Image (tube, grey):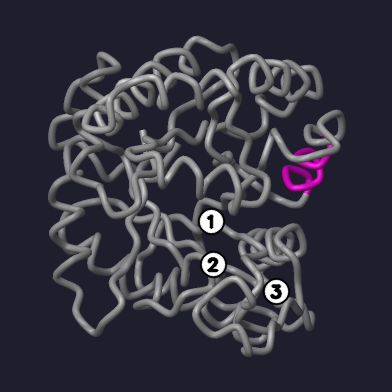
Amino acid sequence: MTAEIGPPRGADLAAVRSKAEILRGWVDAVNITDNQGSHVRLSSWAGSLAAMDAGVEPVMQMTCRDRNRIALQSDLLSASAMGIPNVLLMTGDHPKLGDHAEAKAVFDLDSTQLTWTARTMRDECKLLSGRALDPAPDWFIGAVENPFAPPEGFRAQRLAKKVAAGAEFVQTQFVFDIPVFARWMEQVTDLGLTERCHIIAGVGPIRSLRALDHMRGNVPGLHIPDEVDRRLRGVPADRVAAEGMRLAAEIVQLVREIPGVSGVHVMAFGYERGIPEILEGAGIGARGDSVGSDHAD
């Protein structure tokens, strides 16, 4: 079980610590987002350190949007030096989608290239330039994938490239369409990827019709089936939030039954306090004080 914390828009770590404390004992690790949606926030490495201070293992997200290969490798080295055990490597949203639309996008590397870079740094003890690293960094390397983006038939092969590059765990886009996700998992399994990489299904609540409209119309690659739309619109307005929470809990239960799924990643941005409720609704109790394994699965 993993969850997600968005750092604050301000120079204060208290919000990260308080959210991590809510999740401690419920999840094995928490993602700390990296200027999510191209909006300026406190950095993911600072948030990761705050999560560790609160007793929760962090997964530090890194995007290629804001850094060239020099800065990316430097941040990866620094993460390892500070004891951050997991990195999740992403291409990142374009700046035009965020609060500094005029910002220059970098994209010196893409997510697959950055994954290969991280594996090379760790396993071959060298930088992209070929210069040796002493000591080499050490972290568990993660990536993201969207089983629902077109063309659907090639999404498993796309994941195969990231696994070949070095991805050891993968977190997916929100899962609302169980049949499509199950077909993707069959393809992933047939390629032997579940033997080399842990697949963690993305789940989260839709707590308002406004959020539903935004997710259906403005989030690239996010697929919400018509039956989900009808279900949420079919309850009174004051019950949409509760129905969205129940739906998220049901999806957690369903994806856990799909062969090859290693875990669930719960995303409730701005409503992290509701994650324990979702897990309880899915029949998953608190995990005690045993969080902080060597590597997050």
Does residue 169 appear in this view?
no
Q: Amino acid at mark 1?
A: Leu
Q: CA distance from mark 1 to mark 2?
A: 6 Å
Question: Residue 297: x, y in percent?
Answer: 45, 36
Q: CA distance from mark 3 to mark 1?
A: 20 Å
For the record, the magenta segment spans 157-164
Of the pair 209 and 181, the residue shown nearer to us: 209
Upstream in the sequence, badge 3 or badge 1?
A: 1
Residues marked 2 and 3 touching at CB (< 8 Å)? no
Q: Which residue is mark 3?
A: 126
Badge 1 marks a residue whose secondary structure is: strand
58 lies above or below 283: below
Q: CA distance from mark 2 to mark 3?
A: 19 Å
95 lies above or below 120: below
- Position of 198 with respect to 81 (left or right) is right
218 in the magenta segment:
no
Question: Residue 96: x, y in percent?
Answer: 64, 77
- Position of 190 with respect to 209 (left or right) is right
